[in-house]
Image: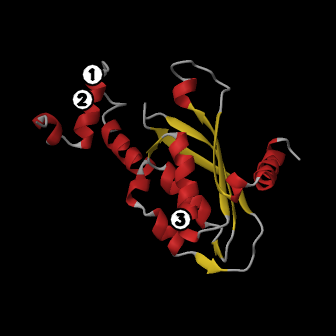
């Protein structure tokens, strides 16, 4: 059975209740407008739930005979971890080898944004980006690498300020062909080494 106090409560009511439980006075000057601000902030930070990633790509496909690697790298990303609802942020690198179709380049950062603007874990975010591109244009292969810093590791828990997590998803020729994977990783590594 659902708790009637939760089902009838507004988002703002829930934020006020949380502040009270944390020992704050939600009526004091600095906090009086906070519940509304938090509501608007979460609507913005989690707007990816209202967007369709496959429709985004479907509207930006172009027939093309180009069959070399296409890389969009250093795409800035931020998200909220689903375990603590704390931010994680970093860069995403995406590559694919076309098989008769390409995606408008601006749509790759938009695709990343749609998936990152949801409660996430980095591993799922990485595979969602790769699998959506694979499904949408059926390229020869897709590679995605995400490098991120997690505030849940930096502010709490192990409190390691300089740690980063790196995840990858390699599909098609990026998984099957060492040479293709090595070329992709080398090209994104050059950025890191300042070359």
| Direction front: furthest residue | 176
Spatial separation of the CA atoms under disc 3 and disc 1: 46 Å
Asked whether disc 3 touches disc 1, contact meaning CB atoms under 8 Å apart, the reply is no
Q: Residue at x 67, y 73 (%)?
A: 99
* Numbered disc 1: secondary structure: helix
Q: Residues within 10 Å of mark 1 (few under 14, many from 20)?
A: few
Residue 169 drawn above or below residue 15: below
Label 2: few (<14), some (14–19) or many (≥20) C-alpha neighbours in 10 Å:
some
Mark 3 vs mark 2: in front: 3
Q: CA distance from mark 2 to mark 1?
A: 6 Å
Query: Do the CB atoms of the residues marked 2 and 1 lie less than 8 Å apart?
Result: yes
Q: Left or right of 56: which side holds 168?
A: right
Q: Which residue is mark 1?
A: 21
Residues under labels 3 and 2: Cα distance? 43 Å
Judged from the image, the secondary structure of the residue bearing numbered disc 3 is: helix
Q: Which residue is mark 2?
A: 17
Instruction: Choose the circle earlier in sequence order: 3 or 2.
Output: 2
- Frontmost residue, 12 versus 107: 107
Give the residue at x 52% y 76%.
Answer: 59
Name the N-terminal-most of marks 3 and 1.
Answer: 1
Q: Residue drawn 55% across and 37% down?
A: 88
Mark 3, residue position? 135
| Residue 150 figure quarter | top right
Q: Between residue 172 and residue 95, name the one nearer to us.
A: 172
Residue 10 lies, in percent from the top left, at 21, 43
Residue 97 occupies which quadrant of the picture? bottom right
Q: Position of residue 39 (x, y in %)?
A: 34, 44
Q: Is residue 18 left or right of residue 55?
A: left
Check the image and report above or below for 44 versus 33.
Answer: below
Would you place residue 28 above or below residue 169 in this image? above
């Amino acid at each position: 059975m659902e708790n009637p106090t939760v089902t009838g409560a507004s988002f703002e009511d829930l934020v006020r209740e949380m502040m009270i439980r944390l020992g704050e006075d939600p009526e004091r000057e600095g906090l009086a407008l906070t519940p509304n601000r938090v509501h608007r902030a979460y609507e913005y930070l989690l707007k990816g739930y209202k967007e369709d990633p496959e429709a985004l790509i479907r509207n930006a496909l172009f027939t093309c005979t180009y069959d070399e690697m296409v890389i969009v790298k250093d795409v800035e990303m931020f998200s909220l971890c689903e375990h603590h609802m704390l931010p994680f942020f970093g860069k995403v690198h995406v590559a694919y080898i076309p098989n008769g179709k390409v995606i408008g380049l601006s749509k790759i950062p938009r695709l990343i944004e749609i998936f990152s603007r949801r409660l996430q874990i980095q591993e799922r975010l990485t595979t969602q980006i790769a699998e959506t591109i694979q499904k949408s244009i059926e390229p020869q292969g897709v590679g995605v690498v995400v490098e991120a810093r997690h505030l849940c590791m930096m502010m709490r828990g192990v409190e390691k300020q300089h740690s980063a997590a790196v995840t990858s998803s390699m599909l098609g020729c990026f998984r099957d062909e060492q040479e293709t994977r090595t070329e992709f990783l080398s090209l994104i590594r050059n950025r890191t080494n300042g070359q």
